[in-house]
Amino acid sequence: MHAAILYSHGNLHSLLATFGLERWTPVSSLIALAASGIWMYFHKKADIWLLIGVTACVSRFYTYHGWYDDAVLTLPMVALFRMSKAEYTLGSKYGGYAGFLLLLSLAVMIAPGGTYLFPRPWNTVFVAIQSFIFLTILGFFLNHARKCEKRPGE
């Protein structure tokens, strides 16, 4: 097993390695990057911070990274903050959801290096919770971009 995969966590490559599918890493990488590029192309007129947030989430889950590379997750947190403050997004309901997701993301990012902060098996639980929260944020961004396209008057 490649050292980059062995010491990584919470991404596509380490997931494939866990199931013994390391040979699918190049194909899965191509699919993930192509899907991200295609999505960006079709949503290029969306708010720039929404696009930055999606790109940061994809980069976090796409490939190897260490715990220190989770700094990229501050970008989706900025996007969530902006969405929670903006009154024009899609009504106060979306602002409230964005604020709640921001609080959750702050809760799991307050302890950087959760892999090393907690003993086993709690470090694995922490990484799973952190990954779930940021996958939820990615889903929220994707749904928000879809809803913004359907706004009348634009």
Image (cartoon, rainbow, N blue to C red):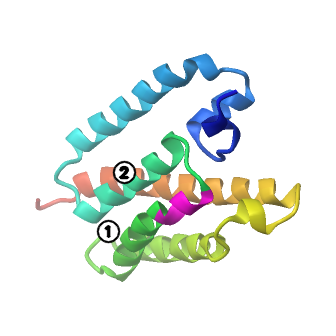
Helix, strand or loop under label 2: helix
First to last magenta residue range: 67-71
User: Dot 2, crowdedness within 10 Å: few (<14), some or many (≥20)?
Assistant: some
Identify the residue at horizontal 36%, vertical 51% (top origin): 55
Residue on which disc 1 sits: 90
Type of the residue with mark 2: Thr
Say whether disc 2 or disc 1 marks the residue closer to the N-terminus. 2
Residue 137 picture location, percent across and down: 50, 59
Identify the residue at horizontal 74%, vertical 59% (top origin): 115
Side of 52 where 133 appears, left or right: right
The numbered mark at residue 55 is 2
- The residue nearer to you, when weighing 148 against 60, is 60
Depth-wise, is mark 2 or mark 1 nearer the camera?
A: 2
Side of 109 where 149 appears, left or right: left
Residue 42 picture location, percent across and down: 22, 40
Name the quadrant of the N terminus: top right
Side of 102 where 125 appears, left or right: right
Q: Is the magenta stretch mostly helix, strand or loop?
A: helix
Furthest toward the top, the residue is 23
Type of the residue with mark 1: Leu
* Residue 92 visible in the displayed image: no
- The residue nearer to you, when weighing 142 against 75, is 75
